[in-house]
Image: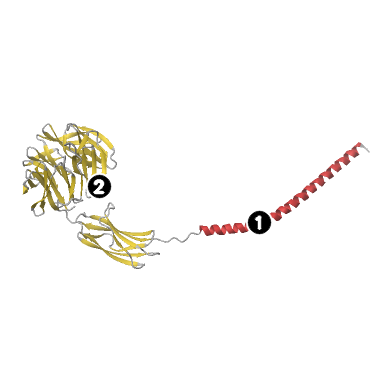
């Protein structure tokens, strides 16, 4: 055989062997593929059933129950803008309906701040739907003229439906109910006399205590007094007899406990104590609603609310060093401490960053326009006598009672002061905004004075030295 022939035969045999192996591999793959197809064909049906089952379950679980809608409330009367005058009754007609039984319908009147002006009324409908008719008495003379909101809410389980309407209420005219004269028959007792609207005078109460201050809240229908050493902080009703609340005097060893009492623009009685604290009390209930920690070794003497800040005139334990403390009204956090060069008799807000401080220094009275932001100010007016009392007539005009008996009318806009009367022994001045008159505690009398010309229009003899005069209004 030729070598080339053997080589050719070897290649042929090799290609034949490769084809044989490839054929075997193909047959094997076909067999395995067939088994796999039969397996997946069998399992595919099971998987299909499982998929159908899961899909049905999923759709079933996703299908939520139809939500029950809230009750529907429609105020039929009064219409929006309806007005009435106090005293009167508000006739309310309302339609209510719901998909479920309506358990309760409430009727609420609120002022512009969202505060209820009376207890809400409740009604339970006897049917569904139902038309309800209720009568709401509007009789309180505390209500000022303004816009109020009537809210009617229907409750059905956890669901609530509401409707609103606004009404205009014309309040009763502002009027003086009585004047309370707080006197000191002697060092250890305090008297309360009432001057009613007809001018009649009666003794309402006598208490064994000293007298550290007094203030009145017409809105809360209370007036309060404090003793320094032996008297409590005590709130009286308008009759001067009933005591809605009081706080004890914690004095020890003859040291004064209560150091100040002021009614501020937020409606709270602010009371200073010897522990270096100033507290704001709810005038109606006595609940403690504000607490301010004063500077170390300082005590509150006068307090004034200026926007969102409380300004406190403070004196140290020696009675010689004075300063202003400025606090965040809501939190009590201190904002600033500012040194003063005079005692403070009275303090009034002038604007959002200034107070007018009326005080004394070396036998002279003066008023300072004090800048709370920059700790400084100027003195519009000084008087050659100490100040005993101050009352504000309006934002620009103040009456000042001097120790020498002069009654001054100070006008901020021109920094001027004129003497309108001479009245001996004036200790307190209070404005009756209903009549525009000033009531003065003078000696053993209470005087009603025209603040424009200083003329005394009425004189009420109390019979004991009067230290505070408090006009109580209908609101």
Query: Which residue in the structure is indicated by mark 1?
Result: 44
Q: How is the image coloured?
A: secondary structure
Number of other residues with Cα within 10 Å of mark 2, as a class: few under 14, some 14 to 19, many 20 or more: few
Taking depth in this image into account, of 330 and 207 the one nearest to the observer is 207
Q: Which mark is residue 120?
A: none
**Circles 2 and 1: CB atoms closer than 8 Å:** no
Q: Which residue is drawn at 10% across and 33% down?
A: 363
Residue at the outermost front position: 253
Spot occupied by residue 166 in the image (x, y as percentages of width and height): 28, 58
Task: Answer with the quarter of the image where residue 190 lies.
Answer: top left
**Residue in view at x 11 percent, y 33 percent:** 364
Q: Nearer the viewer, residue 211 or 166?
A: 211
**Residue 389: quadrant of the picture:** top left
Tell me: 357 left or right of 443. Answer: right
- Residue at 47 percent across and 61 percent down: it is 65
Task: Indicate the secondary structure of the residue bearing disc 1.
Answer: helix
The answer to whether residue 182 is above or below residue 40 is above
* SS assignment at label 2: loop
For label 1, the crowd category at 10 Å Cα-Cα, with few meaning under 14, some 14 to 19 and many 20 or more, is few
**How far across and how far down the image is residue 62, in percent?**
51, 57
Judge whether 113 appears above or below 385 on screen: below
Residue annotated with mark 2: 287
Q: In which quarter of the image is the N terminus?
A: top right
Q: Which of marks 2 and 1 is in front?
A: 2
Query: Of the residues under marks 2 and 1, which one precedes in the sequence?
Result: 1
Image location (x, y in percent) of residue 276:
23, 37
């Amino acid at each position: 055989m030729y070598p080339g022939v053997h080589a050719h035969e070897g290649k042929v045999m090799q290609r034949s062997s490769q084809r044989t192996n490839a054929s075997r591999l193909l047959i094997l793959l076909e067999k395995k593929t067939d088994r796999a197809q039969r397996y997946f064909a069998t399992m595919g049906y099971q998987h299909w059933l499982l998929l159908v089952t899961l899909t049905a379950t999923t759709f079933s679980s996703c299908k939520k129950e139809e939500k029950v809608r809230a009750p529907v409330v429609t105020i039929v009367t009064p219409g929006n803008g309806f007005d009435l005058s106090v005293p009167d009754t508000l006739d309310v007609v309302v339609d209510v309906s719901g998909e479920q039984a309506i358990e309760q319908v409430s009727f609420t009147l609120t002022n512009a701040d969202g505060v209820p002006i009376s207890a809400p009324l409740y009604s339970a409908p006897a049917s569904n739907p139902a038309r309800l008719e209720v009568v709401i008495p509007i009789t309180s003379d505390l209500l000022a003229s303004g816009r109020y909101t009537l809210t009617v809410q229907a409750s059905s389980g956890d669901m609530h439906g509401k409707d609103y309407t606004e009404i205009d209420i014309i309040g009763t005219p502002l009027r003086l109910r009585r004047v309370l004269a707080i006197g000191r028959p002697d060092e250890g007792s305090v008297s309360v006399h009432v001057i009613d609207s007809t001018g009649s005078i009666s003794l309402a109460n006598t208490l064994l205590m000293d007298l550290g201050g007094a203030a009145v809240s017409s809105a809360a229908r209370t007036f309060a007094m404090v003793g320094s050493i032996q008297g409590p902080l005590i709130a009286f009703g308008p009759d001067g007899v009933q005591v809605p609340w009081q706080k004890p005097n914690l004095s020890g060893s003859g040291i004064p406990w209560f150091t100040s009492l002021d009614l501020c623009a937020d409606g709270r009685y602010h009371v200073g104590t010897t522990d270096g604290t100033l507290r704001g009390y709810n005038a109606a209930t006595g609940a403690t609603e504000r607490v301010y920690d004063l500077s170390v070794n300082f005590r509150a003497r006068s307090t004034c609310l200026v926007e969102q800040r409380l300004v406190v005139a403070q004196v140290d334990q020696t009675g010689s060093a004075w300063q202003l403390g400025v606090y965040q009204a809501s939190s009590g956090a201190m904002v600033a401490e500012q040194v003063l060069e005079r005692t403070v008799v009275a303090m009034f807000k002038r604007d959002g960053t200034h107070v007018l401080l009326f005080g004394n220094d070396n036998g002279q009275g003066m008023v300072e326009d004090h800048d709370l932001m920059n700790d400084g100010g100027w003195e519009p007016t000084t008087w050659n006598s100490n100040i005993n009392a101050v009352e504000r007539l309006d934002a620009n005009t103040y009456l000042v009672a001097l120790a020498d008996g002069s009654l001054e009318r100070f006008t901020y806009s021109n920094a001027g002061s004129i003497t309108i009367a001479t009245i001996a022994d004036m200790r307190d001045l209070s404005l009756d905004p209903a009549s525009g008159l000033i009531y003065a505690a003078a000696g053993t009398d209470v005087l009603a004075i025209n603040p424009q010309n200083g003329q005394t229009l009425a004189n009420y003899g109390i019979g004991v030295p009067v230290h505070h005069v408090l006009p109580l209004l209908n609101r």
